[in-house]
Image (cartoon, rainbow, N blue to C red):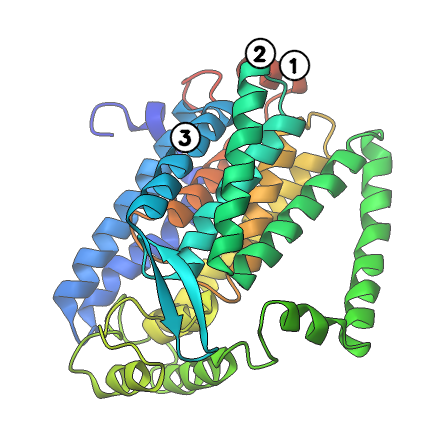
Amino acid sequence: MLTDYRRVIGNPSRLYWILGFGVFACASFTWSAVPELSLRGGLQYLSTIVCALIASRLISIRTMLSGLSIGVAVVLVYSLLFGEFSYDPLDGKYSFVGAFGSKNQLGLYASLGAYTGLVSFFIMRSSIISRVWSAFSCAFALFCLSASQSATSAITLVVAIAAVLVGMFLRRFAPRHRTVFFLVLIPLAMVALLICASTGLVDILLGMFGKDMTLTGRTYLWQRGFEIAQENPILGEGFQSFWVQGFSRAEILWNQFYIPSRTGFHFHNTYIETMVELGYVGLFLLSVIVIVLLAGQLKRLLAAGSCREDVVMLGFTTLFISRSFVEIDFLNQYTIGSFLVYYAAGLIARPMLSGRAKKTGSYAMSLRPV
């Protein structure tokens, strides 16, 4: 970074929409109730973004998939060996939480392992040994996902796989026809969602996972988060300065949701959490990242130079965006969600390579300043 920043992160003018949120999180210490936490958390979060941007230029998607599958397998094995079951007083069930203390965090890693194994086996061209490993790691991840009983992870995994199937279907046609098919699929998908909502299929689906329409209290949590956000609507409380022991509003919510440790809790919605911590300004900056990332992935998929890697990254993007409405996977420093989201954003920020260039060197083809 210090000797040749263009070589490792590219042209900074292409990164303004990515770095804005991280810089604003750092600046929030100036009005935060706990400035030392906001500054420390903001700097760590910004360093996570920079690491992911560097990785997006140095590490190809194929290499990333290989590393991710191995890393997730190690995490899941560790969880099986040293993890435990935990009782959830809200839904009255015991769930396997692994080494995380949270079934949704275990479910996230399991869904990533299953997704990585599936796309590596069916989408990416690889050797027989790699395919055998992909099949084994996928089966193992699905077993862990079933043990965690995480409805969020199971449903969003299905959504991500559906996005991959649509992407592979669109790639079978010429670029000018892809846009037409895509524009036809969008209203069909909306009609299907309306039918599911009106016929009670959503209730049936939630019932399969032991959930109701309140999502085990999340709708109340969202309401409280929105109400708290209105107290400081423009700039918020400060990055990571709400869930602090001794603060009355946080203590009340910890007590209501049976969190005796008084740590590791959140509003279970990325956008409400952002509104509370960074106000409408932070929400706007984060929304820019999400919208540009999704639009960029679709643009690459529909373009003439699209390749299999574009389909894989569309699935990752769909997975985390769909999870963002019930989790906060990419709002914390040094987490797998933050790394993968900003890794994908770094790929979008780079100029699109030709199809032939992607085949010969993927996204990390060269390190020329662009």
Q: Secondary structure at mark 3?
A: helix
Q: Is residue 56 left or right of residue 249?
A: right
Give the SS element for disc 2: helix
Q: Amino acid at mark 2?
A: Thr
Q: Earlier in the sequence, mark 3 or mark 2?
A: 3
Q: Position of residue 209 (x, y in %)?
A: 59, 67
The residue singled out by tag 2 in the image is 360
Q: Is residue 258 visible?
A: yes
| Residue placed most toward the observer, 312 or 287 | 312
Q: Residue at x 50, y 78 (%)?
A: 216
Q: Quadrant of residue 260?
A: bottom left
Q: Is residue 278 above or below residue 221?
A: above
Left/right placement of residue 202 relative to residue 131 reads right
Q: Secondary structure at mark 1?
A: helix
Above/below status of 324 relative to 206 = above
Residue 151 on image: x %, y %: 56, 63
Q: Nearer the viewer, residue 155 or 186?
A: 155
- Identify the residue under disc 3: 70
Residue 19, above or below 56: below
Q: Is residue 335 above or below residue 173?
A: below
